[in-house]
Amino acid sequence: MDKLSITGGFPLHGEVRVSGAKNAALPILCAAILTPEPLVLKNVPKLNDVHTMRSLLAQMGVRSEAEDDALTLSAADIDWPLAPYEMVKTMRASILALGPLLARCGEARVSLPGGCAIGLRPVDQHIKGLQAMGAEIDLDHGYIEAKAKRLSGAHFVFDMVTVTGTENLMMAATLASGRTVLDNAAREPEVVDLADCLNAMGAVISGAGTDRIVIEGVSRLSGATHAIMPDRIETGTFLVAAAATGGDVALTGTRPDTLDAVLDKLAEAGVAATIDGSTIRIKRNGRLKSVSMRTAPYPGFPTDMQAQLMALMTVADDAAMITETIFENRMMHVQELKRLGAAIEVEGNTAIVRGAQKLTAANVMATDLRASAGLVIAGLIAEGETVIDRIYHLDRGYERIEDKLSALGARICRVS
């Protein structure tokens, strides 16, 4: 099993290009199920989760061909509308095949999902929404079995904001008869990117990016070409890494308009960011100020950046309070940060981080995808060699992170 070895204490300098967004690519890959014509995607990140999704789609009958960062998917024939446990258990986003399969094939059998152990993340909103659209759904031996001759438009109000739930129902509604209205919908940029792709395929969707999305069902979708949006979480991770090490880094190919909450917190911490089109330059000269934060659905501070900001606050002045409101188990990285010398106490869903003068290296273990990124940042500022185990989590969401960091001057390497 691979590990990362990081020798800390070296400021990051230089320029790096941001990859396509994992959380946009995965639902858009599933959108290929909705049409028998080829869907051409560009700026597709080379990630384990993308590979897993391609394999999942392949066993359903979806062919895909990759060339550089482009991917062509063809779902002319869906042979087997099944997402088996063996493939779903490693990636929760596999649930996104449910809506498209049901809309296109009239049936679907999808295993209840796995993924990072950061919280329950129930799929009841997906099921309730599809039932509101006329689907017959049974839970059988860990599988969701759904049937519908053709889904019908419906008005559905989410009990809670859910990104994958919004995406699943939005995709299903594109081929439903009549109008579907989704209220209390997720507003994340990745939802907007999916809607843009679906509209390019002939769907009629309005309101994406707001809490009310309206979909006018059509009888058929066509092929299209779509570029995946830049990954705002990868962008934020590198911004925080540059700030933590006291570096000067330019990130190219970004979407600054999707990062207001992160950029605001960095500015509050005393880190200057300048924006020039799609390039963000981050530079830190003085000491870091402590900032408190609560995670929230977009446009609030993203839960996927919580661990990274916590790593930054371990070397800031004074104390910071970091409150997690999205996932109940997303503080598992605290114990690993404490192994590096961080002064952190957890009370319920809030971590109190008392800034230290320095972190010292240790062997640590990644517990989930974003916790891994937080440990990488901590390793970049810790004295000595930090070794991070179980980095398969990291490979699910970051494309060649060690190569990108090495190009910026980090002393980091993968150890097999």
Image (tube, rainbow, N blue to C red):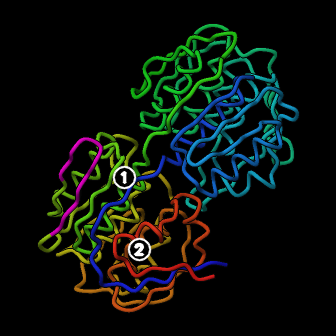
The percent coordinates of residue 200 (x first, y second) are 53, 21
What is the spatial separation of the Cα atoms under label 1 and label 2, in whole angstroms?
30 Å
The nearer-to-camera label among 1 and 2 is: 2
**Residue at screen point 25% across, 67% down:** 243
> For the residue carrying disc 1, how many other residues have a C-alpha within 10 Å: few (<14), some (14-19), or many (20+)?
many
Is residue 43 visible to us here? yes
Q: Secondary structure at mark 1?
A: loop
Q: Position of residue 283 (x, y in %)?
A: 19, 64
Q: Which residue is mark 2?
A: 406
Q: What residue do we see at 29% from left, 39% from top?
A: 257
Could you say which quadrant of the image residue 47 lies in? bottom right
Q: Quadrant of the C terminus?
A: bottom right
Q: Amino acid at mark 2?
A: Ser
How many marks on residues? 2
Amino acid carrying label 1: it is Thr
Q: Is residue 16 above or below residue 122?
A: below
**In the rendered image, which quarter is residue 114 located in?**
bottom right
x, y (%) of residue 122?
62, 45
Above or below 286: residue 281: above
From the viewer's perspective, is residue 14 above or below residue 365? above
Q: Residue furthest top?
A: 178
The verdict on residue 398 being magenta is no
Q: Is residue 313 visible?
A: no
Query: Where are the magenta residues, as a range?
Result: 274-284
The chief SS type of the magenta part is strand
Q: How far from the left and from the top, in percent, is residue 173?
A: 63, 19
Residue at image mark 1? 295
264 and 338: which is toward the camera: 264
For marks 1 and 2 on the same chain, the one whose residue lies earlier in the sequence:
1
Identity of the residue drawn at 51% across and 60% down: 398
